Amino acid sequence: MKIKILLVDDHAVLREGMRSLLENDKDFEVVGEASNGEEAIALVPRLQPDVILMDIVMPKLNGVEATKRIKQMSPVTNVLILTAYDDTAYILGLLEAGACGFLLKNARGSEIKDAIRAVQSGESVLDPVVTRKLIERVISTSKRTGEHVSREQLSQREAEVLRLAANGASTQEIAEVLFVSVRTVKAHFTNIFNKMGVSCRTDAIIKGIREGYIRLDDTLRE
C-alpha cells in the first residue's frame, strides 16, 4: 500500500519538484498540496494523509501551530518537517508540537524518501544532538507543568525499549541489545504507541520524559 503524502509549503516550485520526486517512486502517492498551515488543516480530514511534509515559515499559519492543530485533530498523521531553517528553537518547537522529525531542504532526494518511510514505520528522524536538546527542554518544561499520565502504564520491557530509542538506537540495535528479534521490537513499539496514544518515536520519547519513564541520564551515553 502506498504512503499517502500531503505537501505543505508556500513555494509552488518546491512543491512541484517534491511531487515529481515522490511520484516517481512506487511507494508514494502525493494526495494533495497546501501553501500554508490553514489550507493544510482543512485538507487533512478529507485526504487523510499518512505523512505530511511541512514547512515552518508560511503565511497565515506557520508550521508549528499547524502541526499542533493537525496532531490534535489526527494523532495518527505523521508530520515530517522539511525546512531551510536549522534554528534549534524552531525545530524544538515543532517536535514538541508533534512533528516526528525534520530534514533540511538541502537534503538529497533519497534522504527525504528514506525519512518518509522511517516515520511511517515508527522510526525516528532526528539528529542525536537535537534529541539531547529536546530531552533537556522537555524535562525543564515538565518540571514546571507536571506530568501527564498515559492511558495505560508501560511494562518494564516497553520502558526499556523506549529508553533505548531515546538514546538514539535503531530498531535493529535495540533488538541486538535485548537479544530479541526485530519483529519483537516492532511489536513493543506498537504497544507503546497504543498505550501512549502517539504515532511515532519522537512523540513517545517526549511523553515518556513527561511521565518519568526517561531521565536525562538514560540518554546519549558516550
Image: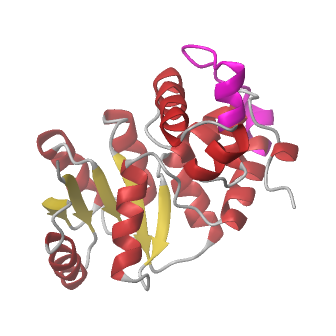
Q: Which contiguous range is marked in magenta?
A: 140-161
Tell me which corner region of the image, top left, top right, bottom left or bottom right, holds residue 151.
top right
Residue at (73% x, 51% y) in the render? 167
Point out residue 20 in the picture as x, y percentages from the top left corner: 15, 78
Q: How many marks?
A: 0
**Residue at 18%, 70% in the rendered image:** 25
**Residue 37 appears in the figure:** yes
Residue 16 higher or lower than 140, as above or below: below
Magenta span includes 160: yes
Depicted 106 relative to depicted 65: above or below: below
Residue at 38% over, 35% down: 72
Residue 62 visible in the displayed image? no
Please identify the quarter of the rendering in which residue 39 is found. Answer: bottom left
Magenta run includes residue 38: no
Q: Nearer the viewer, residue 30 or 10?
A: 30
Residue at position x 33%, y 80% in the image:
109
Specify whether 215 is left or right of 200: right
In the depicted view, which residue is nearer to us: 133 or 12?
A: 133
Looking at the rendered image, the quarter that the C terminus falls into is bottom right
Q: Is residue 102 left or right of residue 77?
A: right
* Residue 31 on image: x %, y %: 12, 57
The chosen color scheme is secondary structure
Point out residue 140 in the picture as x, y percentages from the top left corner.
Answer: 79, 44
Q: Picture coordinates of residue 82 (x, y %)?
A: 40, 70
Q: Nearer the viewer, residue 3 or 41?
A: 3
Q: From the viewer's perspective, is residue 188 above or below residue 21? A: above
- Name the outermost residue toward the top: 152
